[in-house]
Amino acid sequence: MTKYVFVTGGVVSGLGKGITASSIALLLKSRGYKVFMQKFDPYINVDPGTMNPIQHGEVFVTYDGHETDLDLGHYERFIDEELNFTSNITSGKIYKAVIDKERHGDYLGATVQMVPHVTNEIKNKVYEAGVTSGADIVITEIGGTVGDIESQSFIEALRQIQYEKGSNNTFFVHCTLVPYIYGSNELKTKPTQNSVRDLRNMGIKPDALVCRAPYDTGEAIKNKLSLFCSVPVSNVIDSIDVKNIYEIPINYYKQKIDEIILKQFDLPIKKANLDYWKDLINTVNNLKEEIEISLVGKYVELHDAYISVVESLKHAGYKYNIKININWVDSESLESTNNLKEVFKNSKGIIVPGGFGSRGIEGKIKAIKYARENDIPFLGICLGMQLAVIEFARNVCGIKDASSTEFNQTCENPIIDLMSDQKSIVNMGGTLRLGNYECTIKKDTLAYKDYKQEKILERHRHRYEFNNKYKELLEKKGMVFSGINEKANLVEIIEIPNLKHFIACQFHPEFKSRPTRPAPLFDSFIKASCGK
């Protein structure tokens, strides 16, 4: 029978529930158990695909083409498992499913209510994750904070699961804050007590507390929390600030949180294999050099909008023992400056990631032109590839009005255009080209040198494509189309071979990068940037 770990949060948001859930999953996997992860988000959007990145952060895409919360990126990077459509469930997705069933007549005329219909749908999503993944243990994070109105249906569903499956098949981890009060110079337990009381009033007794605090809480605080929250002292886990997030699983391992969970599940406590993770921590804490990489984007005021890109740059840095410092460049501000030399004076490489809409486009094109003309290592992703092609068409091929129909629907030279099957689409959500698509790589190219194979699978999230009408002209001027989706004859990778390192892709390689295994395009980009 599948076992279930639920991670809830109290007091305030932003405590690190996602990292806690990921760390627990990593520890259980290190002991030989098959794990799977999912996130429940209480917002009513069906998925984050249409939400503003500045408000919500990055949209992470699974291999099977679902737009999900950025926490799934943390999950995949920590446990090195590909997640799927069952991994991110929103209130909107639940309500939509219930309403669709009601309209279809599935409830046989019953009055549709929060309990049991909505809660049953939530429970089905939990159980479905266990069935489709074949996992021994499913770890589910509940977004938001206990006490929020919008998350109450999720908490009620978990209460029912706890009753239906029993305590030997369910384990509740409650993440909470133990704040430090300056002046009295002490840690305070009352916020945690109140949060656990709220959870217990909703029918759930936590099995462990993960306490976010600036330093170890100590025996007296743990005894107090144990007494007032009815949790064994051994199950009160400190989550202190660390030098890097990769230390968090080891911190939990030392406090035996994985053993506590396995004992409650009556599962064997197999020997943990964490040597590779400890090697990673040692590498990250002892990076010998550092370089600056300029990230040119339109959502730079919220760094989480590019979190997978940033993490992928770091992963490649770890391989070459180099710390990556990001120079955050607002593409819109570049449009009004001509002193690009000053903007990029310390940067060893320039990356232009994905995005949507016309704002800041000309600034990105200026950055790409600067990288090309000054032979600075360049990596373009999704929109970054499209703009690299437009820049080349304008400034090398002489097509001065080259553009994309995304920015100018009446342009005479649409280097980037909608595919025919996209032109009739009305809804914005879930209608992009999403998930894994195959790409065939030409031999004797930079892309082939990076991937070392002819066929690859990479994740996509875009609607517009390169217009093949212009392919022959760009090739004559020196651009190489090194990656093609042969099934639809779509350009996936472009490069300029007479430069030190200039490559761009239509897909999102950052979604498959791992701390111990950087994505090939990021690997070669950082390698070129640091002169290795």
Image (cartoon, rainbow, N blue to C red):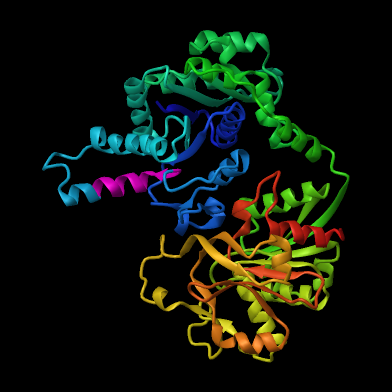
Which residue is at a point 13% across and 39% down the rendered structure image? 110
Identify the residue shown where x is 57% and y is 18%: 269
The image quarter in which residue 298 lies: bottom right
Front position in the image: 508 or 111: 508
With respect to residue 182, does 496 lie above or below?
Answer: below
* 177 displayed left or right of 121: right
Q: x, y percentage for residue 496?
A: 74, 77
Q: Quadrant of the C terminus?
A: bottom right
Classify 149 as above or below 352: above
- Judge from the rendering whether residue 72 lies leftward or rightward of residue 475; answer left or right: left
- For the N terminus, give its image quadrant: top left
* Rendered location of residue 179, percent (x, y): 63, 24
Whether residue 14 is in magenta: the answer is no
Q: Position of residue 273 (x, y in %)?
A: 67, 28
Q: Is residue 261 left or right of residue 379?
A: left
Place of residue 42 in the rendered image (x, y in percent of width and height, measured from the top left) = 41, 41
Q: Is residue 67 visible?
A: yes
Q: Is residue 395 above or below residue 46?
A: below
The boundaries of the magenta stretch are: 87-99
Q: Is residue 506 visible?
A: no
Examine the structure image and report whether residue 92 is included in the region drawn in magenta: yes
Picture quadrant of residue 213: top right
The residue located at (58%, 31%) in the rendering is: 29
Prevailing secondary structure of the magenta residues? helix
